[in-house]
Amino acid sequence: MPTKRTRREHKWAPGLSQYQITELLTGKIRYPVYGYTGYGNGEGRDLAAFITDRMRHDWAQHRDELLRFWISGRYSSELAPLWAPWLFFRGAPGTRPWAWWELEDRAPVVDDESEDEYLTRLGLWLDGERELFERAGECIDERAAAQRRKP
C-alpha cells in the first residue's frame, strides 16, 4: 500500500540560505526571477564586491561544516531534499572553496603552485582529506585507462 509522505526542506546550515551557501563555496552569484536570499544586491555579479562583516561572520560560524562538505566531493543536491537545481555545484578534496581563499588570512600561493601543493607545503590537509584526494586521482586514472581501451 502506498505511503503518503510530506517532503520538508532541511536547513543544513541554520541561518544560511541555499544562495549564501552556494556563494560562500563557489563565489558565484545566480539571481533567480524572485526569492533571492544571498549576499548580492540583485544586479552585481562580482561576489567580492559584496564582502561584508555579515558574510565574514557567516563563514566563520559555518566554516568547518562547509569545508567538510566541500572536500567530500558530494553534489550540492545532497544538502537538502529541495535544493534549487540552478545552484548546482560540487567541491573536491585537495581544493578549497571561494570563501576560504577570499575571507581568511593565508600565506600567498607560489607561482604555478597547485592547490594540493599549497596545502601540502603549509600542512593544511584536513583529517582524511589526503586519502579522498588520492582515491579521486585513482578513479580519474582508471577512467582514462578505460577510455584508451575502447575501440
Image: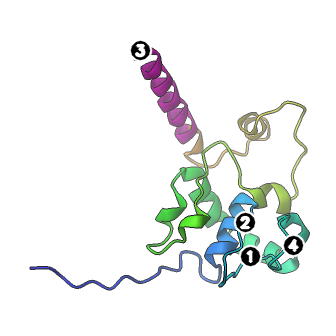
Instruction: Give the SS element for disc 3.
Output: helix
Instruction: Give the SS element for disc 1.
Output: helix
* Residue that numbered label 2 is attached to: 24
How far from the left and from the top, in percent, is residue 27? 76, 61
Amino acid at dot 1 = Asp
Amino acid at dot 3 = Arg
Q: Nearer the viewer, mark 3 or mark 4?
A: 3
* Residue that numbered label 1 is attached to: 58
- The vertical placement of 91 against 76, above or below, is above
Which residue shows up at 69% across the image and 81% down it? 36
Disc 2 or 1, which lies upstream in sequence?
Answer: 2
- The vertical placement of 23 against 136, above or below, is below
Nearest to the observer: residue 89 or residue 61: 89
- The vertical placement of 47 against 17, above or below, is above
How far from the left and from the top, in percent, is residue 31? 71, 73
- Asked if residue 137 is among those painted magenta in the image, a careful observer would answer yes
Q: From which residue to which does the magenta span run?
A: 131-151
Tag 2 and tag 1, C-beta contact below 8 Å? yes
Cα–Cα gap, marks 2 and 1: 9 Å
How far from the left and from the top, in percent, is residue 114? 77, 34
Q: Nearer the viewer, mark 2 or mark 1?
A: 2
Amino acid at dot 4 = Phe
Amino acid at dot 2 = Leu
- The vertical placement of 128 against 10, above or below, is above
Cα–Cα gap, marks 4 and 1: 13 Å
Q: Residue furthest front?
A: 33
Which mark is on residue 149?
A: 3
Instruction: Give the SS element for disc 2.
Output: helix
Badge 1: few (under 14), some or many (20 or more) residues near its Cα, within 10 Å? Answer: some
Which residue shows up at 66% across the image and 84% down it? 34
